[in-house]
Amino acid sequence: MTRRGPHSALRDFLHSEAAGGIVLIVASLLAMVVANLQSTGDSYAAMLHMRAGPVLNDHLGPMTIHLWINDGLMAIFFFLVGLEIKREVVDGGLTKPERRRLPVVAALAGMAVPALVYLSITSGMPGLQRGWAIPAATDIAFAIGVLALLGDRVPTSLKLFLTTVAIVDDMGAVAIIALAYTDHIAVAALAGAAVVAAGLYALNRRGERRPGIYLAGFALLWLLTLMSGVHATIAGVVAALAVPVKPTPAAPDAADSTLHRLEHALHPLVAFAIVPLFGFANAGVSLDGIGWAALGEPLVLGIALGLFIGKQAGIFGGVWLADRLGIAERPKGVSWLQLYGVALVAGIGFTMSLFIGGLAFPGNPMLEAGVKIGVLGGSILSAIAGFTVLRLAARR
């Protein structure tokens, strides 16, 4: 009889995230193929914009398949993000101040520098400044998927560092979406959302532990948030932070912890269905009529270089400065070359970058196409360069 090793929540998370990242890559490549085939390209676009529901928000108009994916299913993705954020802060790698310093410094620098790169390239171009946050995000599933291709050549401590940086990065992305991409507010609906959120937190304080109650509250909060004009995915994070968690320091997740139960139940759905479906619905860009000159457009160049140059400079530079100034130490057993490789891999923006791009330039097909080309170009460059550097570092 084979004896199994101890359960590891981190190992389970990294394995499922890596597999989900590979599925996401396949779904995105399929979208590119479908969008560029003469026989399916028009059908692909028509299907995504087919009416599939009532008008829940006057600004958005009738619900379409694309809106259900981006504003509905992605709210579940952000609900899971919120659960992971709370778990890390209460019961994970961000519980102690000394553990937070390096990921926070790296993530903040890794968001600020790409934004500055983008703004410097698009300066003087009216309307493009609204996309400053597009290259600021990291796609954790895609990034871990690339690391998975290297197997045990990448130490677990390095994967954990990338995961915690991406989680802090997600916190910043949520704040950006809430503050920078909310234009129209319906006060009554927003007040209703606030009442529902307060009710969820009150249930937590009273000891309510049934997952179904929090899922029902999340659904109602999502509807009211969508109707209010604030991007509906914010409801996912707000609801998640109200979910009770039972801390289990230095032990596997607690079976009676509501947060852990919801996280384990939702993660396969998000990793293997929702995120790949989002990739399929958003990565497909028709290259018909787009020449090499398009790669030099300020929007495309700003996003691609923001991801490829800005991310590596921000994260690696932030870690180097933090280590030199004594703010925080680099992860034990990790070389500087390996850290540089991970900083490159963090330039894979993909899911979050495409998501923010859709918020920055809604209803503008030309700019949306430029966003997709820039995100795909910068992410592919970052993936190839990061994979190469990490493989070289493993040989050394």
Image (cartoon, rainbow, N blue to C red):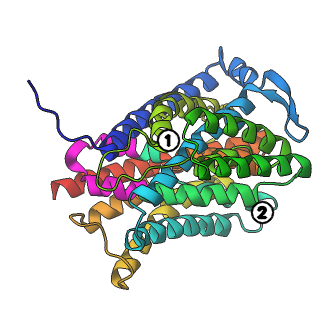
Left or right: 22 in relation to 338: right
What is the magenta range?
144-163
The tag earlier along the polypeptide, 1 or 2, is: 2
Q: Is residue 296 left or right of residue 158?
A: right
Q: Can residue 395 be spotted in the picture?
A: yes
Q: Is residue 353 left or right of residue 106?
A: right
Q: Does residue 147 belong to the magenta stretch?
A: yes
Q: Main secondary structure of the magenta part?
A: helix
Q: Nearer the viewer, residue 371 or 91?
A: 91
Q: Secondary structure at mark 2?
A: loop
Of badges 1 and 2, nearer the viewer stands 1
Q: Position of residue 223 (x, y in %)?
A: 78, 37
**Which quadrant would the C terminus be assigned to in this image?**
bottom left
Identity, as a three-letter code, of the amino acid under mark 1: Thr
Helix, strand or loop at disc 1?
A: helix
Q: Quadrant of residue 136?
A: bottom right
For mark 2, what is the residue?
125
Determine which residue is flagged by label 1.
258
